[in-house]
Image: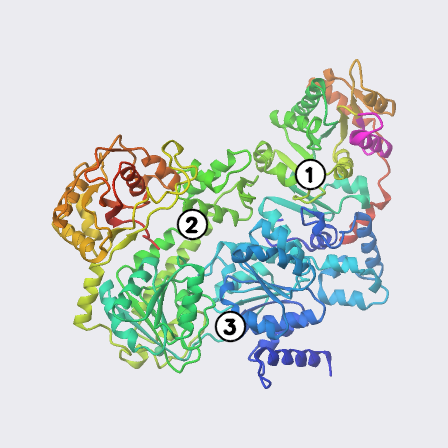
Amino acid sequence: MTGNGLPPETEITLLLCGGFSATRRDEPATPLNVGEFNNLADALTSHGFSLLDLLDHTRQEAIRSDPATAALLTPRIETLLTRGTAMAMAAERWNSLGFWVIDRTSSRYPERFREHLGASAPPLLYGAGDTELLNRDQPRVAVVGSREIDTDGEAFARTVGATSARIGALTVSGGARGADRTAIDGALEAGGEAIAILPGALQQVATSRAYRSMVSEGQLTLISPYHPGAKFTAGNAMGRNRLIYCLADLAIVVESAKESGGTWAGATETINAGWVPVGVRQTSNPSAGNQALIDLGAVPITPDTVSSPDAFQTWFDTTTSSHRPPEPSPASQQIRLLD
Amino acid sequence: MSNDERLYQEALTHLRTALNQPDAIFRDDQYEAIEHLVKDRRRLLVVQRTGWGKSLVYFIATRLLRNRGDGPALLISPLLALMRDQIRMAGNLGLRAVTINSTNTKAWHEIEGRIECDEVDILLISPERLGNEKFRERVLAELAWRVGLFIVDEAHCISDWGHDFRPDYRRIGRILQYLPNTVPVLGTTATANDRVIADIQEQVGESLRIIRGPIKRESLRLQNIMLPTQSARLAWLAEQVPRMPGSGIIYCLTIKDTQNVANWLQSEGIEAHAYSGRIEHDERIELEDRLLRNDLKALVATSALGMGFDKPDLGFVIHFQRPGSVIHYYQQIGRAGRALPDAYAVLLCGEEDEAITSYFLETAFPPERHIDSVLDALRNSDNGLTLDEIERTVNLKRTQIEKVLKRLSTESPTPVYKQGTAWRATPVEYRPDHQRIEQITALRYEEQAQMREYMERQQCLMGFLETALGIVDPEPCGRCAPCMGQPILPDSAGWEIASRAHQFVRQQSYGIEPRKRWTNPGVPALGYTGLISNELRHEPGRALSLWRDSGWGEMVYAGKFQRERFPRKLVEVGAELIRDRWRPEPAPTWVTCVPSLQRPELVPDFAQRLADELGIPFFPALKKRYPTEEQKSRQNSYQQLKNIAGSFAITGIARPGQPVLLVDDIVDSRWTFTVAAAELRQAGSGPVFPFALTTMFGVGG
Ligand SMILES: [Zn+2]
């Protein structure tokens, strides 16, 4: 998002799906969710139009006057399309503060989101820091776990980050307090790199004294499916959990409650979908949640394994190679609809 | 009737309503511009001289778009104060035009409500508003959802190649880059050369269409006159201005000069008034109104009286000093003679012109060490710093800090941003674009040289200006001094008036206003917090000269730094100023001075001789407890007060309760006088009248 504005694909996606204000109240029509966005794109394509036609006054008129497509431009969509000035002001602001926004057709968009999530991949990603990390050919370890962890859990998370850095792997995490941040701190302190996938508050985290220089120096990349000014909400946090798993080669659960909470939901969703293998911290006296995940097929990993780079490397190789990836999502083709 | 004809008829009806003239027709290109915006919803830059009717274009376009159900227009203009007439015209078209600015914050809430109910057709805001986060979130968010036409007035400011580039316009340029083609855009300007137009096109995009009209003003009669000294130029003005047709503008490069020239003309019985950014908003409006009504012979103005001032019968524009570029010059003289057969544009050139324009040029960009120290302070803070807190942390003037923040916050990407009242660092690594800064500075020097060339030009002057502004092979105008082969106006003034002017220059003095407030947090240990009470404040004072000016400034400088004693002449003129012109009331009955450990004799010696000349006693009532840094090494108020507070001791008040003259050689921040006066008052002296030989205040515009 430098230089002359946004690519048209990003423009139309932002106009239809983006939020521009910190407070939802200010938005007179609700932006489209990913399903609605896909449906509109499909419908236009099947009548010989494309989403990009919505960026041109004359083409818009053509869609409105064609009886086959006139009904597609509902009042809600018409309202969303008038948001050009709000969008430009928001995009200018984000860019000025060092944030970028990309859509699914961008070459910088994580290939793994397209691969695993297909048409349900988030239409937009916002972020700060080096986008090159997103698709770099490098092993990636996701670390997840609750916000409330004990000192053992904290030490474990930090060690996973540090050891990942030592074996040349990228740490992917959620950036929340607790396991997430501890793992990232471990990776950064060990000189490694990390990606934090945030459920909002992008601007707050990126400008915090703790992470500002890491971001500007390319060690830490922050991304979020929610715009930089968006507030942190629990709903948002659930929505982005799957992104953490999908961006990694495998995930390690530090601590999970049983049958409740975001960690449990994300881990079980991943085990069921089979996106990536899920590892779980194993101790002599595991929590009910951790034990239940092992019972569901998660791979146990001990503190000893994570503290030895060699042992960790071996565990990483074995776990990833014995994992059977799912069939590519049939919907993944639809993602090309903007090309 | 075809759709196109229908649109034309509709537009014509609105034109006639707006002007209240049933037979009005569109002027060159006006309808074309409207059609491009309304029928095609595209992007347009209109380059037309003042008076062409650009406001008609955007109001009629807004009216037509609103008739078609489109959203309201957003108009960004630096000239809101000058748009009262235009707003009236919008009213004729049934357009509900609303202005939002810093002077009507109380009305914001109501305006928000009206925007929400779609009861605003066109919103006018200043470029600075657009940079204000709170305003964007609160007021603009609602409107920005539906803007049907995006209008940028004075669009040449977008280009940093432009002659009066403004940092806030950078943001507008970038917003335009992000603006999807779904929103039609209109930019308007009266002055843009090829380079500026190309730059705007690059920012707004290839689809920008350009409508450009002729620039020549047929009624102007141009003449250049070289008069090196200020007094010679003052004399010329006093002699010629009364003979000029109607009312006009005299442009100066600095605020100080506007005051001097206006004072001089007033003393010669000419209705002239100073006008600059330092004059209160309401008074500026009042002055503009008086000029419009020909109730003033002339406004003596800085470029603050600039864009958008619209007086069709302006009879003359005289430049007291040479402006920095042809485009500046042309824009300023272009205000004259729009509806007159003859109007004068005279360029007076003096010895100081080059120095002043170079000073502006060299200080256009904040120095890198200023940028670094502000950035360091912000990066070392957890939750950002307010302006006051930055001032306490770094040794820079508040204006310097503000300049750095303004510059940085309008960069993109920017290393700083403002959240509430605090400035915070972003994750952006900032590197100043040296190459671009050098290129722009080099261009500014070229422009300065071009203006020098103009000054010396012996052939058609209008032709020179047109060529410089991109007109190929212009015809000689046949009306300027070189075309006429002789001066249009005499190029010097009579001997008598010249000697009065010389006298005037030597008699200038400069007020020293008392400070009314301690810094925040001040120096609580000494009780220096909040307002400075009347009992501690000094009275209004005077300075004899401006730092190194052509009156007495050079003599003061030489006395201090070369001879280490002030000459007898300064004692005489100082006493003359105090006794005959200033006449402080109640008259001081004794003299004291500001002590210094570095030059313990210099000021007391002068004060003693001044006291003798005034026939009142001198007592050194103050002494220095310990050496302090020179005040001028302390860059801002907080640091200056901290440096000086508590450094004086009282040796005794010679005449308790009696008014006293407090003498110093140089006044700059006024903190020394403020603290010394507070000490004297606390020790029991009467009112304190400060007197300085020279003032640094107001140097460099
Ligand atoms: Zn001529």
In this figure, which residue is indicated by the disc labeled 3?
B48
* Residue A266 counted in the magenta span: yes
In this figure, which residue is indicated by the disc labeled 1?
A134
Residue A179 place in picture, x, y as percent: 71, 26
- Name the side, left or right, on which B340 lies relative to B586: right
Q: Amino acid at mark 3?
A: Gln
Where disc 2 sits, the SS reads loop
For residue B454, say whether it is visible.
no
| Callout 3 and callout 2 share a chain | yes
Quadrant position of residue B448: bottom left
Q: Which of pointers 1 and 2 indicates the residue nearer the eye? A: 2
Of mark 3 and mark 2, the one earlier in the sequence is 3
How crowded is the residue under tag 3: few (<14 C-alpha within 10 Å), some, or many (20+)? many
For residue B520, say whether it is visible.
yes
In this figure, which residue is indicated by the disc labeled 2?
B365
For the point 19% across and 67% down, which residue is it? B500
Where B468 sits versus A209, above or below? Answer: below
Magenta residues span A257-278
Residue B488 place in picture, x, y as percent: 29, 79
How crowded is the residue under tag 2: few (<14 C-alpha within 10 Å), some, or many (20+)? few
